[in-house]
Image: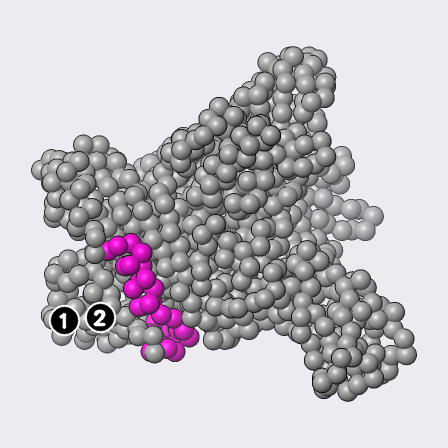
């Protein structure tokens, strides 16, 4: 396979860092032996189905359970009133932000089952439990809910209109938080001296993340021990344990276990504490029987947190040479009908600071109004704030280049932070530690044959096709997150990571990680790190995750953090094992600790041939002979916590070519080139898979996917895979990946992260190509998705199919 | 009602309701949870199994229609000694899976496709697996896997 060549390391270990080791976790999935939550059966288990609101906004007048309770097999029917009676709390927001003038984020109550009012189509109103799913489903139909339907507010612009319906009575203007970053006066001054101002108005389309495994949860209660267990499709079981136990159900932490086994994709959608998790746990305790809920896909469309959904006005001030002087951005972001776990943080802290991009723009000011609407709550989706920022900036840069007659690569180069300009302090909080976006750009231009484009465009024109080329450079802040920064930004907790290395008497190793693997290949990547560090084969390493009874603590997987934060914790833990191994070796070899060297799995007395293998040390640790017990304990297991000092900053340059059929408006992706600086590469094969997968998800946002609500009724119009268009195999084109490494300066592996860069870079890249294909019609922006209908209308409105560009 | 069919090479009989779907029957009655349900509109293909050698979406197949049929799920694809089917091996070798949820349906679709298109082009494969969603891989490695798997199936047949 053709994997990115540059890994940033030269390891001799065939299962160590830099090896394209085939994945250890593949076998169970290929054989149909994965263990997903929906596959789990517990003794005496019941099945639960939610009754969900068909209205976007309504008062609940009454709920009549009687007919449902009388149906065959029905065990119980629970409502928001029952939650109240049992003293169950609301779902907490874990990352509120500080608004203008120190104003706090408004955090209205978010009951796990609606109380008094429903606020979006899909808001849960009752939970029906029966012996079988079919019986629960039948009985759910028999729950009679009387609603007093209220006017709904759906779009963010409508939510801010004077006299708009209020989603919450005590928040009459629907504003959750009005937030700002940057220096407004310096930015205004920059615009006053501008030779040119480029402007753009754009929408970042609302998306549904749709991991292929629908969400699911099983609650279980062991009366004999007073012990609760929740099995859930979560990216962060320890945080669910903390939020649900402490804030919702009042279960002491030592009495609650949360298990997230194999999880079929997350993309952020599964990194929130959801109502259903609390409801099944609570219901299981009430019944004394396990309660299982498995989400239907259609139900997922109206209950999984959605992503994106911004409306933005942006302008860039430039001098006469195309140098960026200032950037001003005003965004309205949708929060939906309640705050999801990280909702307010996404369009603020993860958005505004990324507007600096890879450029030296000296003055930036961004303000964001996050607003409530009668729609599903909106939260992080792969990239989370950073794709939105990149889209604004990179579209605006293209508009400026066109208006000023400067080549699109050249205008970027003129404004780019030079390779020797790091560390670089942006005007919007971030200090970039390292990077070489110019190097990425140079390689991308070559790989995409940028110079040869006019000939290809002419060839397309000869076939009656409109060809366009699009370029985007990006930067992202990953490795979430330095606690010292994140806590100042409002997060209610730390964002460090934990890892434990358990060495068995025979020298094999079990690693317990606080991160969660749901497709990223952690079981292989982390095993390679141990293989490299301890000098043992990766096959002798097992990676354990996703069970709060096994792994002491962890913050989970999101924000491209697993390697940069979790991997760093793992290195620290491995180094502690080596340090202890050195003491054991010194004892066994009758040498001083300081004289013991460790390399390639062997402890050696320096300058001699006296040595002990890692396995011999492990055995000795468990069969200690004459240990000096006051200074050396038996056993060999070490845990480490790693809290990063800064974010990591992957960056890169992407180029796409598209062809448009002017008669139908169909946009076809022809090629995609990515050159990315992600720091040290542990497994090039896995990295390539992550990047390609992300690029295609971003392609989905750019060309296909759109979560559409009826603007009046608040009904979700794109509520199934028949209406919500996700990329399929016949939508893709050859995607070429190359890495261009500068190492992260502040973590032990020099890694930056690669999980999200695809969705961050590709929407802007693809839309820049679409706009380029239509530029001869005077088009300077196309909103996403660039669907056939939208593109055809643009062509038609510009005077019909102009076949030659 | 009682139906009899052959499941992964073994004759079985099972009592089903008229509304029971094949996906639910293999998962719930036989514990074969490798067949996944990823949607409720027959769009995603995570539930694909073979009935009499052809791929079908088991989430929209009534179990009662299977009397006398030969049903193969992902659990029945590997050889008797547990050796991977050439298509399973190709998915492993080409990194054609990430989270693994779409994988069983994708592999079952791929095996049927490759058995009908022994020398497929890249475009043939893209069209051939168009009925299966994958949200992780971006399909590039899946297409490579199917090409490699098809070639390996040819070799295995000749051998």
Nearer to the camera, A70 or A571? A571
Please say if A161 is above or below A130: below
Outermost residue on the left side: it is A799
> Are the residues under badges 1 and 2 in a single subunit?
yes
The percent position of residue B156, horizontal first and vertical second, equals 59, 31
Tell me if residue A442 is in the magenta stretch. yes
Relative horizontal placement of residue A742, taking residue A201 as reference (left or right): right
Viewer can see residue A8: yes
The percent position of residue A308, horizontal first and vertical second, equals 38, 51
Relative horizontal placement of residue A771, taking residue A634 as reference (left or right): left
The percent position of residue A358, horizontal first and vertical second, equals 32, 68
Q: Which residues are magenta?
A: A421-450
Mark 1: secondary structure: loop
The percent position of residue A579, horizontal first and vertical second, equals 71, 77
Please say if A395 is above or below A325: above
Coloration mode: one colour
The residue at which mark 2 appears reads as A414
Mark 1 touches mark 2? (CB < 8 Å) = yes
What residue is at 12 percent from the left and 62 percent from the top?
Answer: A404
Nearer to the camera, A19 or A222? A19
Choose top left, top right, bottom left or bottom right for residue A59: top left
Outermost residue on the right side: it is A626
The residue at which mark 1 appears reads as A321
Please say if A591 is above or below B20: below
Nearer to the camera, B81 or A652? B81
Nearer to the camera, A5 or A786? A5
Tell me if residue B20 is in the magenta stretch. no
Viewer can see residue A251: no
Which is nearer the N-term, disc 1 or disc 2?
Answer: 1
Neighbours of disc 1 within 10 Å: few (<14), some (14-19), many (20+):
few
What residue is at 71 percent from the left and 31 percent from the top?
Answer: B80
What residue is at 38 percent from the left and 51 percent from the top?
Answer: A736
């Amino acid at each position: 396979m053709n994997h990115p060549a540059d890994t940033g390391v030269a390891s001799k270990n065939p299962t160590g860092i830099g090896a394209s080791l085939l994945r250890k976790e593949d076998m169970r999935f290929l054989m149909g032996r994965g263990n997903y939550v929906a596959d789990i059966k517990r003794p005496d288990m019941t099945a639960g189905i939610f009754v969900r609101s068909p209205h976007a906004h309504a008062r609940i007048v009454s709920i009549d359970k009687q007919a449902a309770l009388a149906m065959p097999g029905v065990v119980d029917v629970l409502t928001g009133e029952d939650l109240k009676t049992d003293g169950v709390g609301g779902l907490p927001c874990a990352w509120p932000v500080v608004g203008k003038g120190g104003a706090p984020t408004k955090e209205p109550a978010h009951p796990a089952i609606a109380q008094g009012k429903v606020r979006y189509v899909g808001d849960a109103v009752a939970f029906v439990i029966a012996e079988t799913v079919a019986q629960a489903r039948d009985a759910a139909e028999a729950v009679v809910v009387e609603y007093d339907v209220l006017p709904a507010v759906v779009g963010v612009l409508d939510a801010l209109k004077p006299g708009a319906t209020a989603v919450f009575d005590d928040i009459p203007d629907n504003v959750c938080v009005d937030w700002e970053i940057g220096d407004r006066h310096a930015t205004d001054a920059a615009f006053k001296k501008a030779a040119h101002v480029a402007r753009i108005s754009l929408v970042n389309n609302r998306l549904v993340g749709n991991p292929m495994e629908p969400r699911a949860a099983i609650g279980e209660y062991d009366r004999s021990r007073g012990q609760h267990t929740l099995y859930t499709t979560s990216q962060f079981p320890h945080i669910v344990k903390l939020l649900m136990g402490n804030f919702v159900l009042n279960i002491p932490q030592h009495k609650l276990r949360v298990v997230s086994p194999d999880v079929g994709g997350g993309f952020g959608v599964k990194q929130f504490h959801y109502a259903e998790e609390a409801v099944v746990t609570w219901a299981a305790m009430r019944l004394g029987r396990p309660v299982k809920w498995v989400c239907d896909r259609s139900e997922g469309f109206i209950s999984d947190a959605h992503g994106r959904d911004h409306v933005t006005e942006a302008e860039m001030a430039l001098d006469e040479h195309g140098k960026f002087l200032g950037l001003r951005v005003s965004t309205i972001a949708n929060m939906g009908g309640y705050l999801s776990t990280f909702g307010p943080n996404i369009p603020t802290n993860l958005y505004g600071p990324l507007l600096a991009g890879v450029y030296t723009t000296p003055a930036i000011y961004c303000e964001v109004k996050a607003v409530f609407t009668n729609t599903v709550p909106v939260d992080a989706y792969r990239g989370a704030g950073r794709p939105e920022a990149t889209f604004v900036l990179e579209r605006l840069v293209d508009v400026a280049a066109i208006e000023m007659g400067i080549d699109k690569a050249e205008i970027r180069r003129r404004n780019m932070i030079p390779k020797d300009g790091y560390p670089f302090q942006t005007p919007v909080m971030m200090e970039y530690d390292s990077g070489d976006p110019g190097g990425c750009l140079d390689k991308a231009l070559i790989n995409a044959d940028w110079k040869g484009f006019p000939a290809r465009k002419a060839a397309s024109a000869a076939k009656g096709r409109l060809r366009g080329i699009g370029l985007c450079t990006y930067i992202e802040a990953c490795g979430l997150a330095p606690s010292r920064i994140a806590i100042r930004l409002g997060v209610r907790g730390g964002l460090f990571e934990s890892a434990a290395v358990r060495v068995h008497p025979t020298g094999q190793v079990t690693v317990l990680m606080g991160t969660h693997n749901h497709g990223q290949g952690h079981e292989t990547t982390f095993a390679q790190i141990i293989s490299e560090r301890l000098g043992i084969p990766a096959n002798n390493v097992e990676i354990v995750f996703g069970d709060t009874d096994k792994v002491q603590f962890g913050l989970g997987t999101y924000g491209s953090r697993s390697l940069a934060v979790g991997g760093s914790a793992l290195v620290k833990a491995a180094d502690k094992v080596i340090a202890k191994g050195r003491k054991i070796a010194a004892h066994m070899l009758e040498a001083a600790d300081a004289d013991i060297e460790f390399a390639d799995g062997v402890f050696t007395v320096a300058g001699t041939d006296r040595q002990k293998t890692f396995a011999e040390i492990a055995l000795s640790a468990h069969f200690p002979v004459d240990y000096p017990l006051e200074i050396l304990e038996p056993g060999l297991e070490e845990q480490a916590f790693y809290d990063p000092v800064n974010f990591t900053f992957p960056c890169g340059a992407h180029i796409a070519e598209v062809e448009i059929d002017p008669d139908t408006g169909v946009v076809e992706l022809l090629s995609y080139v990515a050159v990315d600086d992600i720091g040290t590469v542990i497994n090039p094969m896995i990295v390539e898979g992550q990047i390609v997968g992300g690029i295609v998800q971003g392609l989905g946002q750019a060309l296909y996917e759109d979560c559409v609500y009826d603007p009046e009724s608040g009904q979700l119009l794109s509520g199934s895979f028949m209406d919500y268009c996700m990329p399929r195999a016949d939508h893709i084109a050859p995607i070429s990946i190359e890495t261009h490494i500068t190492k992260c300066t502040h973590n032990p592996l020099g890694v930056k992260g690669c999980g999200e860069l695809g969705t961050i870079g590709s929407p802007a890249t693809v839309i820049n190509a679409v706009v380029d294909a239509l530029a001869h019609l005077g088009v300077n922006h196309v909103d996403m998705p660039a669907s056939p209908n939208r593109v055809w209308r643009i062509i038609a409105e510009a005077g019909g199919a102009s076949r030659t560009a | 009602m009682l139906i009899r069919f052959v499941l992964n090479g073994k004759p079985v009989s099972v009592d089903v309701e008229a509304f029971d779907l094949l996906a639910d029957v293999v998962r719930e009655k036989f514990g074969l949870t490798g067949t996944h349900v990823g949607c409720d509109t027959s769009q995603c293909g995570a539930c694909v199994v073979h009935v009499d050698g052809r791929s079908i979406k088991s989430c929209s197949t009534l179990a009662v229609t299977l009397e006398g049929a030969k049903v193969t799920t992902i659990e029945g694809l590997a050889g008797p000694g547990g050796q991977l089917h050439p298509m399973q091996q190709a998915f492993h070798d080409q990194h054609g899976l990430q989270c693994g949820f779409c994988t069983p349906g994708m592999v079952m679709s791929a095996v049927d496709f490759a058995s009908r298109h022994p020398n497929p082009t890249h475009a043939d494969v893209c069209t051939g697996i168009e009925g299966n969603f994958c949200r992780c891989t971006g399909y590039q490695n899946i297409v490579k896997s199917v090409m490699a798997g098809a070639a390996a199936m040819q070799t295995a047949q000749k051998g």
